[in-house]
Image: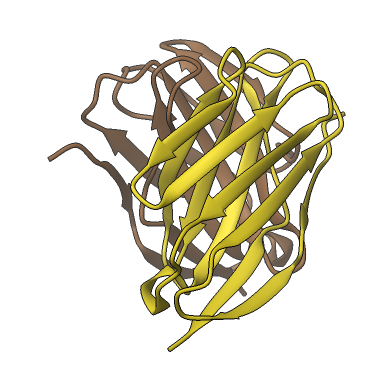
Chain colours: A yellow, B brown
Amino acid sequence: KQEVTQIPAALSVPEGENLVLNCSFTDSAIYNLQWFRQDPGKGLTSLLLIQSSQREQTSGRLNASLDKSSGRSTLYIAASQPGDSATYLCAVPSGGYQKVTFGTGTKLQVIP
Amino acid sequence: EAQVTQNPRYLITVTGKKLTVTCSQNMNHEYMSWYRQDPGLGLRQIYYSMNVEVTDKGDVPEGYKVSRKEKRNFPLILESPSPNQTSLYFCASSPLAGLQFFGPGTRLTVL
């Protein structure tokens, strides 16, 4: 069974800092990996999808990398802003791409 | 506007009273899924569907039913709700192996 872990569980940084969020998974036979953000009391917003054949995916200040062999993905946020404050979740399919397992999330606070 | 809609957004009900939470997407996605989110347990998949008339269990299917008679709709049915089904429910859709889009969530309380 796929297990997904995100470290750290919470992170507080001053505005402007670059930061890295980590996602580890146990079953490396994955089709893709997706990163989301969730604002308090709100739904999930898709950030990036990395296909298994890719190593990186970029969107604006966000860059996600994927290393299937080591079972790891990182989300890099450049020049963090208070508006980046949210919980960040990674999600990994298993058993093909049908069943999806979410990580436990990293709660990020960017302090002005 | 491309979106996933869920109704109702909030629901308070009593134990044993059958209910349905609707989910609809307008992006012609093949894949649809239901999740529940609970404090300390995170998001867990209930059921998913890869296309019309094709559904399968996720990690926590007990007490739930789904159907996929049309591509755009994927209702979640609780035949006899119990208090341990009090949760925040999300519906999502995507192309096969593609980016998932989530609905706004349904907050269910079962008394």
Question: Is residue A6 left or right of A99 when viewed as pictured?
Answer: right
Residue B22 occupies which quadrant of the picture? top left
Residue B92 occupies which quadrant of the picture? top left
Relative to B105, say whether A26 is above or below.
above
Towards the viewer: B91 or A4: A4
Question: Is residue B82 left or right of B95 when viewed as pictured?
Answer: right
Residue A11 occupies which quadrant of the picture? bottom right
Q: Residue at x 82, y 31 (%)?
A: A2
- Residue A83: give x, y in percent of width and height: 37, 73
Residue B17 shows in the view:
no
Relative to A46, say whether B48 is above or below.
above
- Residue A37: give x, y in percent of width and height: 48, 56
Q: In which quarter of the image is the N terminus of chain B?
A: top left
Residue B97 shows in the view:
yes
- Residue B36: give x, y in percent of width and height: 61, 52
Q: Which residue is drawn at 29% across and 36% down?
A: B24
Question: Is residue A75 left or right of A11 when viewed as pictured?
Answer: left
- Residue A29: give x, y in percent of width and height: 77, 15
Q: Residue at x 39, y 15 (%)?
A: B30
Q: Which residue is drawn at 40% across and 26% down?
A: B94
